[in-house]
């Protein structure tokens, strides 16, 4: 999956990405700026990877903004896709994630 992360990072850095309607709605709801998310990419940490998903292979990344950590799912329809996709954005639930928002709590 490291290859997927690298492929998506390269597409984002070259401006070849799109924001799903769902993700745009979440950004708007939470008052988050896409520019802040993009600026935090150099320090993102990959939490989980998914072989298959609605938007193809994807991963959950922890981004740290001035307001605190957020979770962002980035994906790509397939390895030959021109664009990466910002699938969704959410604030980690403190009951479901540890203090650093990097590990799911056991149920």
Image (tube, rainbow, N blue to C red):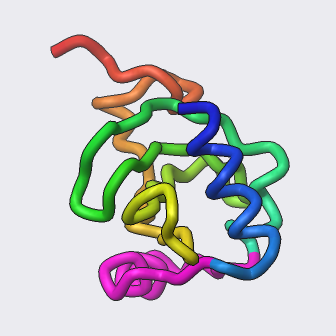
Residue at the image position 62 percent from the left and 44 percent from the top? 5
Magenta stretch: give its range: 17-35
Residue at the image position 53 percent from the left and 83 percent from the top? 18
Residue 15 is situated, as x and y percent measured from the top left of the image, at 74, 81
**Residue 69 higher or lower than 31, as above or below:** above
Quarter occupied by the C terminus: top left
Residue 77 is situated, as x and y percent measured from the top left of the image, at 38, 65
Pick the front one: 47 or 54 = 54
Examine the structure image and report whether residue 18 is included in the region drawn in magenta. yes
**Residue 99 higher or lower than 54, as above or below:** above
Query: What secondary structure characterizes most of the magenta part?
Result: helix
Lateral position of residue 89 relative to residue 51, left or right: right
Pick the front one: 13 or 77 = 77
Q: Residue furthest front?
A: 80
> Where on the picture, by quarter, is residue 54?
bottom left
Q: Residue furthest top?
A: 106
Residue at the image position 53 percent from the left and 24 percent from the top? 99
**Residue 80 higher or lower than 105, as above or below:** below
Residue at the image position 70 percent from the left and 68 percent from the top? 11
Report the label total: 0
Residue 52 is situated, as x and y percent measured from the top left of the image, at 26, 45
Residue 72 is situated, as x and y percent measured from the top left of the image, at 50, 56
Q: Residue furthest left?
A: 107
């Amino acid at each position: 999956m490291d290859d997927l992360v690298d492929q998506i990072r390269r597409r984002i850095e070259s401006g070849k990405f799109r924001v799903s309607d769902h993700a745009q709605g979440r950004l708007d709801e939470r008052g988050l700026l896409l520019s802040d998310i993009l600026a935090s990419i150099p320090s993102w940490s990959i939490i989980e990877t998914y072989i298959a998903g609605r938007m193809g292979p994807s991963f959950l990344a922890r981004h740290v903004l001035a307001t605190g950590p957020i979770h962002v799912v980035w994906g790509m329809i397939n390895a030959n896709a021109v664009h990466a996709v910002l699938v969704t954005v959410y604030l980690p639930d403190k009951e479901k994630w540890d203090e650093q928002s990097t590990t799911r709590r056991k149920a």
